[in-house]
Image (cartoon, rainbow, N blue to C red):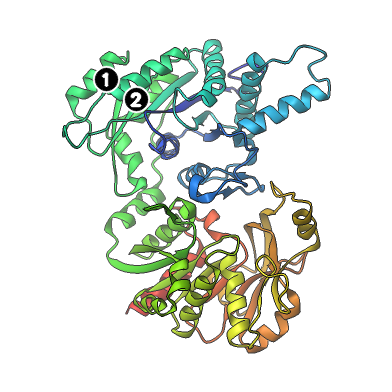
């Protein structure tokens, strides 16, 4: 196994493991991102690794309602949504090497065994699986040149599927006691019938971590309210931490971008620096300061409708399916000193009651994000028609572009059966089809990791809105889809007013469609939300927000 703490140049890599306690969804991902942000502001080169305990090889085949958004990296990996938070807070790309799953780890070990890489030795779950985990973490540190690598272990401590990842962390700590620390992110509930915050669940989580041979160096005390001083002292004592200073209160916040400042209220970067022996300096990013100021002082409110079909699960509405879209809207709005008021609208409602689309007239902008399958499509088409006819600023992302083309073909060109092959292969007017490679994958049921994934180039047409917004003749954007615009329909659609504004030069595939004589009606085959950052709002989202502000006036 590679030696822990290998050097990048002359500096020894330090490692921070972030582990969850009590319940999932407690905020480990934004904790990793926020720790990365505060250390970056102190002049430290940081990167992050996400470990998902699923046997899935990647996140691409997971249900977005259950698991949340699939975040696609620049190099085409389908990853967990936390990778998106890492990129946004660190303002840098995270690549496939920074993501692992149980399935990916086991697959690598088994492939090496088949190739005789273990030279006839008996390959065992322990130590060989944890050794593979350690090797991957160290490879990511070397590839990224990180001085500090932050590793998030998905799920919560005590789950059976996390044991081998915790064992890998224990092995790394054993070989470099001064170079590895552990952060437990745990929830402190306030039972309604008691009305007081309870520390006992976190105490149990800490003891469970101890059972794995690990001791938390810090506890992030998550809860609805701020943890008080007596309970900080109590947690420190019963969880064997040095002092209450190592218990970092982390109450619910209105916006995740407030978390780094909240951490620094407790001098968290200094505490981490002392534990790891880091040389910290003050390197406050003025752009980040300006972003936070814009966020906190935004005045004009914009009502933005996000119409999708992955929001509902039972009685609950989940926005995690479109988290990058939501964050991209925020970045763009705040950069324009506006405050976005988003509403999640289920497209299936418009299928049952078409007249209800009239409610969209009350919104300043409409977004239809990506998706797959047949469910809710007719409702989306009705919403798109409303945006087109009532000149409401519209941005269609991936499926949102494809459906905009279909709606236009049906209503303007009179092709009533216009459709996508994904939904109706028998249509005589297939506006969206699968290219031969994708058609073969579908036929052979090769679904995992076979879509058009990652960054592809796009040439922007002179005089187009897209070219004006980007300010560039050529851009690169990330993709995740199987179906493409059928170029057989390009000429009739353009003649009727739906113009092609961007094309991939190598394949001839249509990337951007724009509607003439509309304040803002843009559909893109790619996912621009994946490249939006707090410090670099995406031009297309900024264009949408500016059009929405004009409509509001």
Q: Nearer the viewer, residue 467 or 233?
A: 233
State the residue at coordinates (47%, 45%): 85
Give the numbered dot on residue 219: 2
Which of disc 1 and disc 2 is earlier in sequence? Answer: 2
Badge count: 2
Q: Residues within 10 Å of mark 1 (few under 14, many from 20)?
A: many
Viewer can see residue 542? no
Which SS class for mark 1? helix
Quadrant where the C terminus sits is: bottom left
Q: Position of residue 421 (x, y in %)?
A: 70, 68
Which SS class for mark 2? strand
Above or below 97: residue 532: below
Left or right of residue 438: residue 525: left
Quadrant where the N terminus sits is: top right
Q: How far is disc 2 from disc 1 in space, using C-alphas?
A: 9 Å
Q: Nearer the viewer, residue 299 or 53?
A: 53
Left or right of residue 320: residue 480: right
Q: Which residue is mark 1?
A: 235
């Amino acid at each position: 196994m590679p030696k822990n703490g290998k050097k990048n140049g002359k500096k020894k890599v330090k490692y921070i493991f972030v582990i969850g306690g009590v319940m999932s969804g407690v905020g480990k991902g934004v904790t990793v991102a926020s720790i990365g942000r505060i250390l970056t502001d102190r002049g430290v080169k940081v990167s992050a690794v996400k470990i998902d305990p699923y046997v899935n090889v990647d996140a691409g085949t997971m249900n977005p309602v259950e698991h949340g958004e699939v975040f696609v990296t620049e190099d085409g990996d389908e990853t967990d949504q936390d990778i998106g938070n890492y990129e946004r807070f660190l303002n840098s790309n995270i690549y496939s090497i920074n993501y692992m799953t149980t399935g990916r780890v086991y697959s690598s070990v088994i492939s090496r065994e088949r190739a005789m890489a273990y030279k006839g030795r008996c390959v065992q779950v322990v130590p060989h699986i944890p050794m593979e985990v350690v090797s991957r973490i160290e490879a990511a540190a070397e590839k990224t040149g990180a001085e500090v690598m932050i590793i998030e272990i998905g799920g919560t401590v005590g789950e059976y599927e996390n044991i081998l990842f915790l064992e890998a962390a224990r092995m790394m700590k054993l070989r470099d006691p001064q170079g590895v620390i552990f952060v437990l992110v745990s929830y402190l509930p306030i039972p309604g019938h008691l009305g007081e915050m309870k520390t006992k669940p976190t105490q149990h989580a800490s003891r469970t971590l101890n059972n794995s041979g690990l001791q938390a160096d810090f506890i992030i005390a998550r809860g609805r309210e701020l943890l008080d001083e007596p309970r900080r002292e109590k947690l420190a004592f019963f969880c064997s931490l040095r002092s209450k200073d190592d218990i970092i209160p982390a109450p619910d916040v209105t916006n995740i971008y407030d978390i780094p400042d909240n951490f620094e209220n407790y001098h968290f970067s200094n505490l981490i620096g002392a534990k790891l022996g880091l040389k910290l300096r003050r390197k406050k990013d003025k752009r980040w300061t300006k972003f936070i100021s814009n966020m906190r002082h935004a005045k004009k409110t914009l009502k933005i409708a996000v119409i999708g079909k992955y929001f509902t699960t039972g009685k609950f509405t989940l926005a995690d399916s479109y988290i990058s879209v939501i964050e991209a809207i925020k970045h763009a709005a705040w950069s324009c000193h506006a405050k976005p008021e988003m509403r999640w609208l289920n497209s299936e409602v418009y299928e049952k009651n078409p007249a209800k689309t009239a409610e969209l007239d009350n919104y300043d902008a409409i977004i239809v994000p990506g998706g797959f399958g047949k469910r809710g499509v007719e409702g989306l088409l009705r919403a798109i028609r409303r945006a087109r006819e009532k000149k409401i600023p519209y941005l269609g992302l991936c499926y949102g572009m494809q459906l905009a083309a279909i709606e236009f073909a049906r209503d303007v060109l009179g092709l009533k059966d216009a459709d996508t092959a994904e939904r109706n292969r028998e249509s005589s007017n297939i506006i969206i089809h699968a290219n031969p490679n994708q058609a073969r994958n579908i036929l052979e049921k090769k679904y995992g990791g076979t879509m058009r994934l990652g960054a592809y180039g796009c040439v922007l047409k002179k005089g187009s809105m897209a070219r004006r917004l980007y300010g560039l003749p050529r851009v690169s954007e990330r993709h995740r889809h199987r179906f493409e615009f059928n170029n057989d329909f390009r000429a009739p659609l353009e003649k009727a007013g739906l113009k092609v504004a961007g094309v991939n030069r190598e394949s001839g595939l249509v990337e951007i469609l724009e509607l003439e004589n509309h304040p803002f009606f843009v559909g893109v085959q790619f996912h621009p939300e994946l490249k939006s950052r707090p410090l670099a709002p995406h031009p297309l989202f900024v264009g949408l927000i500016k059009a929405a502000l004009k409509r509001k006036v």
